[in-house]
Amino acid sequence: MKHLVAAFILICGSVSAQSYQLGDLTITDAFSYPTTGRSGAGYFTLSNEGAADALLGVEADYPKVMLHKSMMKDGVMTMEHQMRVVVPTQGQIEFAPGGYHVMFMGLKEGWGVGDDIKATLIFETSGSLDVTFKVIERP
Ligand SMILES: [Cu+2]
């Protein structure tokens, strides 16, 4: 019976089922898209119930991991390295395609649907939080 319940959760649970808590911070919807290249991006929603904090970086088992922000500059989509992403007091920030994202670089092999990308988010005051980015189908 336990097995049946687990299977049911696997099939019906959306990405949002998994959330991660660190003090007043909550991470939901941590996901990535499949990639065949040397880099991949991670996305999530970050809610803050308390005082302002800042995301300083991400650690993972890849040669280079950075916080990036995609933006239009003179009609060209560019990515800018972010040293510090502020998490406002009782606010929410979205890491999503076309905006903030975690950039994983130097991948040896691509990511496929169902892969788990493990990473640690480093916050200025709250400390560090382990999250898993689930690789899901591109919409
Ligand atoms: Cu990027």
Image (cartoon, rainbow, N blue to C red):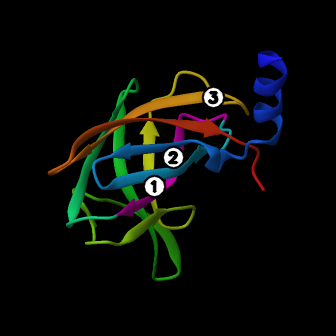
Looking at the rendered structure, which numbered label has been put on residue 42? Answer: 2
Labels 1 and 2: the sequence-earlier one: 2
Closer to the camera in the image, 139 or 91: 91
Q: Secondary structure at mark 2?
A: strand
Q: 61 or 130: which is nearer to us? A: 130
Instruction: Assess disc 1: are there few (<14), some (14-19) or many (≥20) residues with their C-alpha within 10 Å of its C-alpha.
Output: many
What residue lies at 78% left-to-right and 56% top-to-bottom? 139
Dot 3 crowding, Cα within 10 Å, few <14, some 14–19, many 20+: few
Amino acid on which disc 1 is placed: His
> Residue 50: where, in percent of width, then height?
25, 64
Which label is found at residue 101?
1
Taking 36 as reference, is 17 above or below it? below
Closer to the eye: label 1 or 3: 1
The answer to whether the beta carbon of the residue marked 1 is less than 8 Å from any atom of ligand 1 is: yes
Q: Which residue is mark 3?
A: 110
Furthest residue in direction left, as rendered: 125
Which percent across, then down, holds residue 127? 20, 41
Stretch in magenta:
36-48
Task: Verify CB contact (< 8 Å) between mark 1 and mark 2.
Answer: yes
Marks 1 and 3, Cα distance to the nearest angstrom? 18 Å
x and y percentages locating residue 104 in the rendered image: 45, 38
